[in-house]
Every structure is written in C-alpha cells, then in structure tokens.
Amino acid sequence: MTTLEAEQILLRQWRSLPPDKQKSALEYVESLLSLPAEQPMKTSRGLWQDLGVSVTAEGIDKARDEMWADFPRDIAS
C-alpha cells in the first residue's frame, strides 16, 4: 500500500465517523505525535560502548574456561 492509498483510506474512514469519534481520533493522532521518536535497537556491543569494556574472543574463551573449570568431566565411576 502506498502512502497516497493509505491517506485516501484514512480520509474515507475519517469522513464516515461521527463528530465525537473524529475528535477522539484527532486526539489520538496528536498523542502519537507527542511521543518521542523511536530509538534504534543497540547491539550488545553498543550497550556497553560507553563503559570502556572491551570484549574479545580470547576474553570470552578465558571466561568460559574459568566457568567450566570445576564442572565434573567424568561422571562414570
């Protein structure tokens, strides 16, 4: 659907509303305009960008090795 088609549909629907519903619709549209602009989602790297944290593949490997160091390897006795 193009923008022009959407405008035509909205205008046609607007004209079919009774005056009290038109007022409510207008108030709703005005409330949408007052909302802050949507911020793009940050990647996980972008989330800690301002904290000075540097995550490397080696650091992840080291953390994984430390985390699993005490995990029992051989369960069969």
Image (cartoon, grey):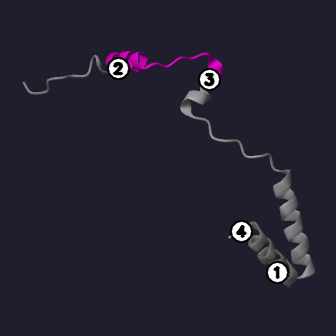
Compared to residue 51, the image places residue 22 above or below, namely: below
Circle 2 SS class: helix
Q: Which label's residue is closer to the chain start, 3 or 2?
A: 3
Q: Alpha carbon of mark 1 to alpha carbon of mark 4: how far?
A: 15 Å
Q: Residues within 10 Å of mark 1 (few under 14, many from 20)?
A: few
Q: Are marks 3 and 2 in contact (CB under 8 Å)?
A: no
Query: Can you say which quadrant of the picture contains the C terminus?
Result: top left
Horizontal side of 38 relative to 48 (left or right) equals: right
Q: Which label's residue is closer to the chain start, 4 or 3?
A: 4
Q: Which label's residue is closer to the chain start, 1 or 3?
A: 1
Q: Alpha carbon of mark 1 to alpha carbon of mark 2: how far?
A: 62 Å
Q: Amino acid at mark 2?
A: Met
Q: Amino acid at mark 1?
A: Arg
Q: Alpha carbon of mark 1 to alpha carbon of mark 3: how far?
A: 48 Å
Q: Residues within 10 Å of mark 3 (few under 14, many from 20)?
A: few
Q: Are marks 1 and 4 in contact (CB under 8 Å)?
A: no
Q: Are marks 1 and 2 in contact (CB under 8 Å)?
A: no
Q: Residue at x 61, y 29 (%)?
A: 47
Of badges 1 and 2, the one in the foreground is 1
Which residue bears the numbered disc 2? 67
Compared to residue 26, the image places residue 34 above or below, namely: above
The magenta stretch is 50-66
Q: Residue at x 75, y 73 (%)?
A: 5
Horizontal side of 67 relative to 32 (left or right) equals: left
Which residue bears the numbered disc 4? 2
Nearest to the observer: residue 58 or residue 71: 58
